[in-house]
Structures are given as C-alpha cells and as structure tokens.
Amino acid sequence: MTKDHKGEGNPSGPEVDEVSGIQTTGHEWDGLRELDNPAPRWWLIVWMVSIVFAVGYWVIYPAWPTLGGHTKGLFGWTQFEKLKVEQGEIFARQREHRRKFHAASFEQVNQDPALFEFARAGGAVVFKENCVACHGAGGEGRKGYPNLNDDDWLFGGAVGDIYRTIQVGSRSTHVDTHAAMMPAFGAMLKPQEIDDLATYVGSMNASQPPSVAWTNGRVLFETNCVSCHGAMGEGNRALGAPQLNDAIWLYGGDHDTLVQSITKSRAGVMPAWEQRLSVDDQRMVAVYVHSLGGGE
C-alpha cells in the first residue's frame, strides 16, 4: 500500500528524508520511501549527446522513410554503393593478379609468394566446384579415385604434368587423352595363375618366405607385367602404369581385389577440362593440387 506524506510542520510542503536530508517523492511502499534524487550529470550529458548524434545521423545518412522510399542523406551514402566500390577495388586487384599469372610460367609463380597464394586460392575454388565430387574435399580420394596428397602419380606429379592431365583427362574423349589401359587377363591366364599372380603382387616387399604360389606368381609377373610395371613393380608414368611395390592402391591391395583387377582390368575415366575451364583456371587448380603435399 502506498501513502503520500507531507513535511512535518508544513502540511502542504514536500517531505524530507530525516537520514539523508534529501526530499522524497512523497511515495511510500511498505515503509520504503523514494528519494527524489536528480539524474547523474554524466548520464544527462550522454543523453544529450545521443540526441545530437541521432539528429546528425538522420541528416547525413538515409534514415527517414518516405512515400518514395527514404531520405537520401546529406552525402547520398548507401551500403550498396559502399559494397560496389569495395568490390570494384577487389576486382581491380584480381585483374592485376590474373594478368601477372597469365603471363607467368609455373616456375615464376612458385618464386613469387603473392602470386603463388593468389593462384592457390583461385585453384582451391575451382577444385571445390569441379573436383571434390570425385577426389574429396581435401584431395584424399576414394576407391577408384586417386588420392592427390600422396606421392603416387600415374602420369607425373610435377605441376606441369598435373596441368597436362587436367587438360586432356584420362581415357576421356580428348584426342590427346592419357589412354593407358591394362588388358583384362581373365581371357589370357587361368584362374589359378591369376590367383598366384595376385599373391605375388600383393606381397612384393613382404619379408615372409616365398610360397609356391608366390614363386609361380613371380614368373607370371616377369612374363606378363614387367613391360609396363617394371621389374620391381616401380611403375611407368609414360604408360600410366601404377607403382605396385608400395602400400598405395587405387582400388585396394587385398588379395580378392587384386584378383578382380587382374581378371577384369580397370577403366577409370577422368574428363578433360580443356574445354570446360579457362586456361588460367586449369593452371590455378594445377598449382593448388601440386601444393596439397604430393606434388613433385
């Protein structure tokens, strides 16, 4: 319950708090009286400055709604014009970098840190838009699609080699595509011979003592596979023949998968990007792929 109090000895005058000596508002709630303290000076100053700032903002910037849209402000500033100007500056810098990149060789790009970072950033965008579906977001690849972070390259891992592969693809419709193709040995060798050959290929570097199947497989390898994959399984990039003496496998290195690969062969296709991307975009993505860690 609230009460209105008057000052003692002055029924019509304001009430003054006995403890603080400050005039009250005359209101009381459960014995608590409200003092009539003025607002702090700093608060009044901030309040008045805010009013002045608001009025100035309304005048300088577009703020008031009108039947035709809104007021334009003293200087005609808009966030859209600001964005347009900033984008223009970015595009101008981009055109300059593109001009330099277009005229530079891969060696010159690698020697220029700013140009290299520009090419790598542009290549990352092109890669995400065109290559991620097969090779993965980080170039890690998956079964049937090469890992671009390791040291195994079918047709070469130098940046120029990567650029060439991007241009013409592998077993694509491009007239100059990498057309390497492993024959299907299911029509040439007996099932047991294929099984022995898979045993040898899967354990070329194994420390286990050779078995009869391993020995037979080695003879078959020397007869049928050395011309492409090399005597030690080191591969041949000129032919696109993969290295077989490491632990990196495109389709899998377990025995059953090797039997399937030898029997039916593999015919993965990478499209040619020469007619799909600009020359600069192809070169940028080559720089990016080369920088992932497996480039030579």
Image: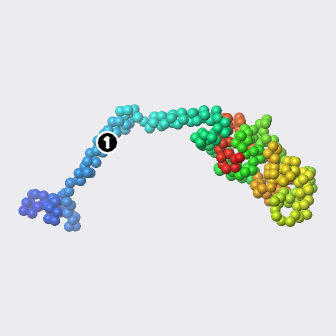
Locate residue 109, reporting x and y percent: 63, 39
Residue at 9% from the left image edge and 57% from the top image edge: 12
Judged left or right of residue 249, residue 103 is left
Amino acid at pointer 1: Phe
Given residues 110 and 65, the one toward you in this image is 110
Task: Please say whether residue 66 is visible from this viewpoint.
Answer: no
Locate residue 152, reporting x and y percent: 75, 50
Q: Residue furthest front?
A: 111
Locate residue 260, reporting x and y percent: 83, 55
Quarter of the view holding residue 212: bottom right
Given residues 123 and 115, the one toward you in this image is 115
Residue at 66% from the left image edge and 48% from the top image edge: 292
Judged left or right of residue 68, residue 104 is right
Which residue is tagged 1? 53
Q: Is residue 57 above or below residue 23?
A: above
Q: Residue furthest left?
A: 9
Q: Is residue 117 above or below residue 12?
A: above
Disc 1 crowd, CA 10 A, few/some/many (<14, 14-19, 20+): few
Q: Which structural element holds mark 1? A: helix
Locate residue 162, reporting x and y percent: 72, 42
In the rendered picture of this protein, how many numbered marks are placed on residues?
A: 1
